[in-house]
Amino acid sequence: MEERTVEVKMKTGLQARQAALFVQEANKYTADVYLKKGDRQVNAKSIMGIMSLAVARGTIVTLLADGIDEEQALRSLAELVETES
C-alpha cells in the first residue's frame, strides 16, 4: 500500500464538479483508492464518500492506494488536487 499527503489547491476544493472529476479519475485504476481527512477515510471511487468529507481548498489530505497500479493512481490523483483550477 502506498500513500501520499497533499494539499488541495483546487479553487473550490473537492465539492460537486471537482469531486466528480476526482472520482472519475480514481475509477480509471484497478487499485483500491482511499481519501483520508483527519481521522475519516472514504473510498475515493465513491462520490458520496468524497462529498461527505467536505474538503475545502487548503485542506491537507492523504491519498492511499493498494493494487497493481497504485503508484500511477496516486500520482494522477495528487496532480489533480494540487492543480489550481
Image: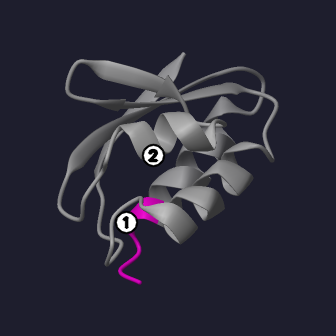
**Quadrant in the picture for the N terminus:** top right
Which label sits on residue 82?
Answer: 1
Q: Which one is earlier in the sequence, the residue at label 2 or at label 1? A: 2
Q: Nearer the viewer, mark 2 or mark 1?
A: 2
Look at the image and tell me in which quarter the C terminus lies: bottom left
The residue at the point 69 percent across, 54 percent down is 25
Which portion, as a residue range, is magenta?
Answer: 81-85
> Residue 65: x and y, percent?
58, 26
Question: Which class describes the residues within 10 Å of circle 2: few (<14), some (14-19), or many (20+)?
Answer: some
Q: Nearer the viewer, residue 62 or 75?
A: 62
Quadrant assignment, res 68? top right
Please rate how many residues cluster around mark 1, counting C-alpha atoms within 10 Å: few if below 14, some from 14 to 19, many from 20: some
Q: Main secondary structure of the magenta part?
A: loop
Left of 19 or right of it: where is 53?
left
In x, y percent, where is residue 31? 73, 26
Residue 61 or 78: which is nearer the viewer? 61
Numbered circle sitting on residue 51: 2
Q: Is residue 59 left or right of residue 80?
A: left
Front-most of residues 80 and 39:
39
Figure coloring: one colour
Q: Position of residue 77 (x, y in %)?
A: 55, 52
Residue at 65% across / 31% down in the picture?
70
- The secondary element bearing badge 1 is classed as helix
Q: Residue at x 21, y 46 (%)?
A: 60
Q: Quadrant of residue 38?
A: top left
Q: Amino acid at mark 2?
A: Met
Tell me the tag on residue 29: none
